[in-house]
Amino acid sequence: MRNLTSKFALLAIISLFSTSAHAIENQYTPYIGINYGYTSVTAKGLHPHHNSVSAVLGSTYNRFFSTEVFYQYSDKDTLGHNAVRNTHFDAYGLDALAYLPLGCEGHIAPLATMGIGQYTFRNKMINNHHKKDHGWGYRFGGGLQYNIDNNWAVRAIARYIHTDDIKYHDHLTEYTVGLRYTF
């Protein structure tokens, strides 16, 4: 996954520098989006899987680059572990995305993304106590976006998320499919 992410990031950097600076017209346009996500979490002794929904608010700067803020909320995964009854998480943060529009119209665009998020995991224990674990997650990924017209787009992204200062959760692998509306 890291090798694939590195290739997408390199592809995005090449696309940014492959055109001359005066050929890129900056046009700031806001967008909103909604994503469905499937997340596999690697934790100490546990391997929960979550379905989640995330809302994004972003801005495109040109056809090659955008940034967005996100909020994500997952469902509860009931575990068969001897101490944890169920777990879920929520997250918020900022992502930067680089695109490489293909073809004359640029409807298909491979993309690379990286960002940072604040992750909070909530675990309900067998004895009905609650434990909360939170910290930073560093997000790296790649995917594909299809621009239906000037306003609507669909995209799919695979991400690797490395967590930092989160005691019981090591990393996450996430797959998202989403819809985006540009104003």
Image: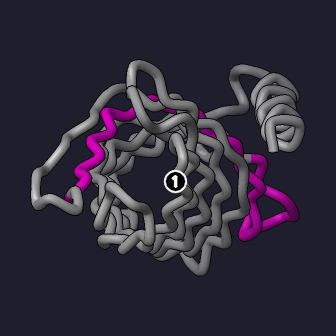
Q: Quadrant of the C terminus?
A: bottom left
Examine the rendering and report whether any part of residue 26 can be seen. Answer: no
Q: Looking at the image, which is closer to me, 142 or 83?
A: 83
Q: What amino acid is labelled 1 in the image? A: Leu
- The quadrant where residue 134 appears: top left
Residue sitting at 51 percent across and 67 percent down?
49
Q: Looking at the image, which is closer to me, 131 or 102?
A: 131
- The quadrant where residue 76 appears: bottom left
In the rendered structure, which segment of residues is drawn in magenta? Answer: 100-124
Examine the rendering and report whether any part of residue 84 can be seen. Answer: yes
Image height of 91 relative to 38, above or below:
above
Residue sitting at 57 percent across and 59 percent down?
40
Q: Was residue 169 drawn as part of the magenta stretch in this picture?
A: no
Q: Was residue 118 drawn as part of the magenta stretch in this picture?
A: yes
Residue with the mark numbered 1: 46
Q: How is the image coloured?
A: one colour
Image height of 85 relative to 141, above or below:
below
Q: Looking at the image, which is closer to me, 50 or 149?
A: 50
- Residue count near mark 1 (Cα–Cα under 10 Å), binned few <14, some 14–19, many ≥20: some
89 displayed left or right of 41: left
Q: Looking at the image, which is closer to me, 182 or 167?
A: 167
